[in-house]
Image: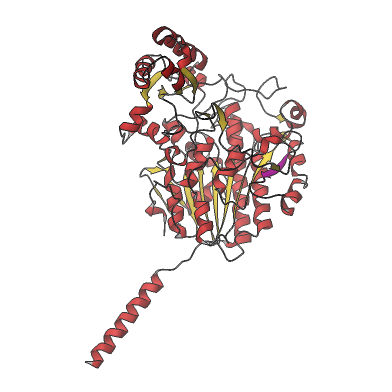
Amino acid sequence: MNKLILLFSIFIMGATSSMQSQYKLDRPKLVVGIVVDQMRYDYLTRFYSKYGDGGFKRLLNEGFSCENSHYNYIPTYTAVGHASIYTGTTGSTHGIISNYWYDKFEKKSIYCVDDFNYPAVGTSSTMEQKSPYRMMTTTVTDELRLSQNMKGKTIAVGLKDRSAVLPGGHSSNGSYWFHGLDEGNFVTSAYYMEALPKWVNKFNQSGLKENYIGMKWETLYPIKDYTESIEDENIYEEPFTGEVKPVFPHDLPELKELNGGYDLLKTTPFGNSLVMEFAKAAIEGEKLGARGYTDFLAISFSSPDYIGHRFGVDSKEIQDTYLRLDRDLAELLNYLDQKVGKGQYTVFLTADHAAVQVPAYLKSKKIPAGYFNEAAFENFIREHCATRWGSSEIIEYISNFQIFLNHEKLKELKLLKEEVSDDLVDLIINYQGVSKALTGLTLQRAEFSEGMLSRLQKGYNQKLSGDVLWIPDPALIPYSRTGSTHGSGYSYDTHVPVIFYGKGIKRGITREPVEIIDIAPTISSLLKISFPNGSSGRVIESVLE
């Protein structure tokens, strides 16, 4: 009997030891989240033959690519994208419903990260008073800090304030963005710190911004080889102020004065290079990945968005931007190899939204597309309300394809919100260029499981959104006839790259549907930490080793 007990004890101890050896808390030293502003998925394939081996190709060939990855909500704007990537949920929960939106309580348009309780740091400008307080949930960066008793660091960098503030979460050790104009420095706000660290001041004084603004933007390779984009001289692009035509080369020293000073860098690939160099300085200055804890570096490359808005997605400028970004990525990855150690860090790369091709260009190719006149639409709505309901003042505000009713005026006129809302839906759905229309009450009472209305519902926030919402026809945008934009739930705006690379990541691809809100829970699972507290995404199991 004693011999049997002894053998049983040895078996249990062996089994326990085996189980312990299989489960290891082996986190990467550093996680790097890369968000490229306005990157369509097809930029990976369209320019693939022109990329070098160390940037996008390295991520694709040595990492895991999700080829059928989409945003699952409307509207597809920068702030909403960054918030959704890092929170693992949509605007219906995290509360960032646009870049700007109408505040029904303050009765004015507000900006997603403005916070006048915190002065700017690193500039005397009053434009840089920012914080993440409007974001209602935690981020994966918050949860990583919480899981390590706040001893791991999170640093977030970008050209745009919203692209640094939201990914950094509520507990960022430092979120930095670029203040252009006559300064050209990376700055922050008193939400994070009282003064810039020495390494940031050193970077701001390094002379890099002067080097970049003193250059001509010429194509990286001979322009005749840029066969994946349309002719350089065309009618679908907007030249810089001071230029006669939107063609290469773009003489930055000559254009600087008329184009916002150092802000001009944002609309060139050198804005990406500046962010890349700042990210390297942050790794060095903060000793990221070298302190015994898992740190997080969130990087946002915003120049493609500025360039796409001005020149459009088929331009030589966009092609050159991505060929140069490819080189910047290669340099960043090599730097991570040296500083953190190859195989010791994890990267994900995605985009905050994609973009539609210039509708005027599409029309020239006989593809249905066009422009939505917002002013004419608003006049139409207000004239109808004056005739049908006795006052145009029942319309309080119209923005982001939403109508906000004046509830006080409705009470004064003894009108029912439901009746007026239903009437407006019946009116709008017959307006040329409108694809779908419905009331906020419908979104509260019904559940749409798929399709465009499902995306609209996931972006609808009961407390913050409007009373009536509508969706324009495909490739119909409220924009100028040069350059392009984004914001819809159509595939040209929702289909973006999602690539994972490095420690804990398999090599491979999947063509199964992936939603952008799946990134945060997947990284959380890799790190073995709590998911962001509003997360509704799923873990992409095929990505993880």
Residue 160, given in percent of the width and then of the height, sits at 62, 38
Residue lying furthest left: 1
> What is the tally of numbered marks visible in this picture?
0
Seen in the image, is 412 located left or right of residue 297? left
Q: Taking 515 as reference, is 423 above or below it?
A: above
Residue 33, given in percent of the width and then of the height, sits at 54, 49
Residue nearer the viewer, 14 or 177: 177
Residue 540, given in percent of the width and then of the height, sits at 39, 51
Question: Which quarter shows the C terminus?
Answer: bottom left
Seen in the image, is 216 located left or right of residue 84? right
Residue 365 can be seen, yes or no: no
Question: Which quarter shows the N terminus?
Answer: bottom left
> Residue placed at 69% from the left, 38% from the top?
179
Q: Does the magenta stretch include residue 68?
A: no
Residue 151, given in percent of the width and then of the height, sits at 58, 61
Residue lying furthest top: 387
Residue nearer the viewer, 412 or 239: 412
> Residue placed at 62% from the left, 53% from the top?
173
Q: What stretch is highlighted in magenta?
A: 184-190
| SS majority, magenta | strand
By what rule are the colours in the image chosen? Answer: secondary structure
Q: Taking 168 as reference, is 16 above or below it?
A: below
Residue 25 can be seen, yes or no: yes
Q: Does the magenta stretch include residue 185?
A: yes
